[in-house]
Amino acid sequence: MNQRISPNLTYHRAASGHDICCSACGHIVAPAGAGKHWKDLAAFTSRPVRDLPGWPGVVHPDMVLREFSCGGCGKLLDSEMSLKEDPFLYDIVQA
Amino acid sequence: MDPITYSIIRHRLFRVVEEAVITLKHVSGTAITNEGHDLMVSLYRADGSLLMGGVGFLHHLIGAAEACKAIIRRFEGQIEEGDVYMLNDPYTAALHTSDVYLLAPIHHGGKLVAWSACFVHVADIGAMNPGGFAPDARDIFSEGFSTPGLKLVSRGELRQDVWDTFLNMVRSPEMVALDLRSMIACNNVAGQRMLALIEKYGAQTVDEVGRTLIEQSEQLLRQRLRELPDGQWQARQYIEVQGEVARVLLTMTKKDDSLTFDFTGSSPQSVYSVNCTRNAALGGLFAPLFPLLCYDITWNQGAIEPIKMISPEGSVVNCIRPAPVSVATVGAIQSVNNAACSAIGKMLAASEKYEDQATAVWHANNFAAFVFGRRPDGRQAIDILTETFAGAGGARTFADGVDIGGEVPNPISRMANVETVEAAFPLRYLFRRRMSDSGGAGRYRGGLGGELAIVPHGCPDGGINFVLSGKGSAFPMSDGLAGGASGVSNDYVLYQGQPQAAGPRFEAEAARLSGTPRAITWGVFALDENDAFYLRWNGGGGVGDPLLRPLAEVARDLASQTVSREAAEKIYGVVFSGDTLDEQASAQRRLHLQAQRQQAGAAA
């Protein structure tokens, strides 16, 4: 049985635990036992917030928009706005 | 007890609070109270625990409970019928010195049976900067009058010596006196209505309803938590002041029927007044928790029991006296609000049952801009620009956020009409409107914030001044959800010295403002005869992938100037043919952008 993690991610039961999969296409973003958070394994891009439309020029130059996407279908799974030196925010739902 | 009596008393308790709020507003004369609704009224049990949380700024439900308990400890054996106590020390219970609590015991048959408590942000508290927010303060001693508890009214008689001493220490004493009288009147009405309720149903019955309500709230919240998945969710907020960057880091852990908010990893306390005390941080996390998790549960002590908080001592969310805290409510407390809103939103979105209750972060960045100066009639004016309360709705998992749609921590916040402000202050608005592109992008976009520009008008001194505690331009604060982007951050610009020959200002757009632009955020500034002050406030966070927003909705956004053409192209993957949105080319463009994402490598 699948278990919801977020609107975009689902646990699928696997032989060695639970795969973390894209809810849209079923692509395995992080296989069971990967030993890493799914964000470390998702397709990842980062761009300066200052370059985005509508943002004022006073935004901190090191502020970035991080986007975590599905490698299977290209759907956006999650995003963060952070200083580029800061670690990812790791959300964990118990399987 | 029969359920009908129980329900009647429960509803009467709600109505007691509502009528007390109306009374407070009828008496107070300040824009921050009457227009912005920076107020709170609640009822507490005899031991100071929360009985019935009211409306207004919800962080105060916890603060006033702590204030009641502090008064009970300090005045043990001396609390009498007709007393009114005052408390505004942040290191005892208040959030900052300018949010003054007045607390009144309610006696029946000579026995203390309950408390009513309220607060308003008084017009001034005698801090080094007018209006209470003191960006120049470097310790609590510079932040104005502060009491850990004093008796303002004794057995129904105003203590004139105390009253006069306090008013002798504040600017605009006539307005501050009105603030205090509004709270005394509010507590009087709450006390009278509570006594009428007790007379009708009996003290024991009313007390039993209170106990049952608290037990029910705890049971209902614990049941709700059990229905949500166990897990851990993180959020991070940045507070930038004069180049110093502080982080508020939250790890929220939900296990079975309890919820722990851990702020370990947050920055050390700041030299600036954005810090908050532990009690204030606790209030700050409950402000979004009550509406998001307890929307159908009575807000009382029972809803507090399943919640734990860890806030490291000496941090920006648990500062040590005498650290300055006067900007806490729009500083660290608001960051705690935002982080808690973000983490709770993610937890709700992880549940099939509660997905529809999830939200991105709403308007997350109050700016405190207190205007002060002489009016044409010669009197001093001090008050806030109430646009700080106008807000912007965060997107939901099924709908866009509401433009200029308020804020989560204060369900009744709002802004004054332009004409109301212009009637009270020597100011003129050049414009005030929704701010295009300010809502966070997403399948569901965040609600727009706004922008405005003001100039002095009819000032006997040529101009006026304003105190700005305006963090939030360097960093976004209204986080998105599930791929949605944060709302666009604030901006504050002083346009100085339009040439005299140009005549009065009538520029109707930011791009047309003349003079030398100066980016400002923090301190006291003059708004001289030829200057203009421009500010924009943040939109709400978005939800979901912007490339999944239907093209018809983007077209509507374009038509209503909610989204610019540049944002439509760069964020929503829209292609135009001349001035027309090309659906086929846009669909191809979106596929191309998704393929580009797929090809990106993993961060690891």
Image: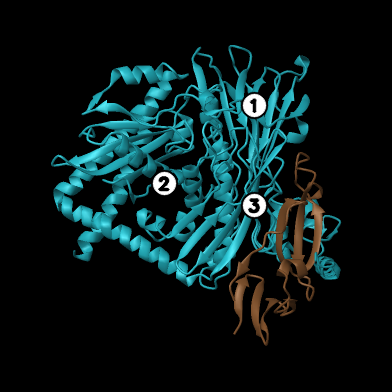
Shown colour of chain B = cyan
Q: Position of residue B217 (x, y in %)?
A: 36, 61
The quarter of the image holding the N terminus of chain B is bottom left
Residue type, label 3? Arg
Nearer to me, B279 or B527: B279
Which of discs 1 and 2 lies nearer the camera? The answer is 2
Q: Name the residue at 44% across, 18% down.
A: B169
Shown colour of chain A = brown
Number of marks in picture = 3
Determine which residue is flagged by label 2: B62
Residue count near mark 3 (Cα–Cα under 10 Å), binned few <14, some 14–19, many ≥20: many
Quarter occupied by residue B535? top right
From this view, report whether residue B384 is shown above or below residue A2.
above
Residue type, label 2? Ile
Determine which residue is flagged by label 1: B523
Q: Earlier in the sequence, mark 2 or mark 3?
A: 2
Q: Position of residue B233 (x, y in %)?
A: 60, 62
* Dots 2, 3 in contact, CB < 8 A: no
